[in-house]
Image (cartoon, rainbow, N blue to C red):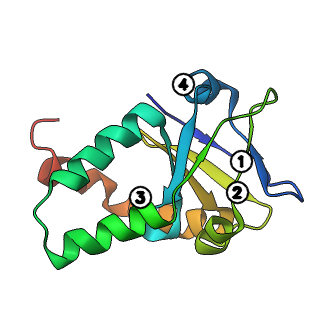
Amino acid sequence: MFLGTHTPKLDEKGRLILPAKYRDELSEGLVITRFQERCLAIWPIATFVEVAHTVRSASSSQQVRDYQRMLASGASDETPDKQGRITIPPHLRTYAGLDKDCVVVGAINRVEVWDAAAWEQYSAEKESAYADLNDTAFPGV
């Protein structure tokens, strides 16, 4: 499970050092892809396979085909190096607006990578509604 917020920096080669607490779960390989709200999602390989199976099994509506294309066409499989670094491909850095300052967020079954300013804005907007989400999205939690 991925939890917490971290603030690593991208180096000049587009490499990101994964937070130490995430490295074991991602050491065997991962998939980086576009995600909603212009961030990137990093999935352990096994979790991405589950997501891909769910997406593949959905009915073939235009919305589903669009989602499948956006998810898969931008995806990149990576293996962290011995220092826990991964290279984020240029097209994904552009998509998420990543330059140097990043925020890495644990999101239960995935890791999200955000531009620091975009995360700050998103977090400020969503934090005020957070208390109300529990009752409407997850009754009883």
Gap in angstroms between the C-alphas marked 1 and 2: 6 Å
**Foreground: disc 1 or disc 3:** 1
Q: Position of residue 122 (x, y in %)?
A: 49, 67
Task: Decide which of tag 3 and tag 4 comes sooner along the chain.
Answer: 4
Gap in angstroms between the C-alphas marked 1 and 3: 19 Å
Quarter of the image that includes the C terminus: top left
Q: Which mark is residue 25?
A: 4
Q: Position of residue 106 (x, y in %)?
A: 50, 40
Residue matched to label 3: 127
Residue matched to label 2: 102
Task: Decide which of tag 3 and tag 2 comes sooner along the chain.
Answer: 2
**Tag 1 and tag 3, C-beta contact below 8 Å:** no
**Tag 1 and tag 2, C-beta contact below 8 Å:** yes
**Foreground: disc 3 or disc 4:** 4
Q: Which SS class for mark 1?
A: loop
Residue matched to label 1: 7
In the image, what residue occupies the spot 59% across and 64% down? 120
**Tag 3 and tag 2, C-beta contact below 8 Å:** no
Q: Which SS class for mark 3?
A: helix
Tell me if residue 127 comes above or below residue 46 in the rendering. Answer: below
Task: Decide which of tag 1 and tag 4 comes sooner along the chain.
Answer: 1
In the image, what residue occupies the spot 36% across and 69% down? 69
Task: Decide which of tag 4 and tag 2 comes sooner along the chain.
Answer: 4
Residue type pointed to by label 2: Cys
Task: Decide which of tag 1 and tag 3 comes sooner along the chain.
Answer: 1
Frontmost residue, 57 versus 133? 57
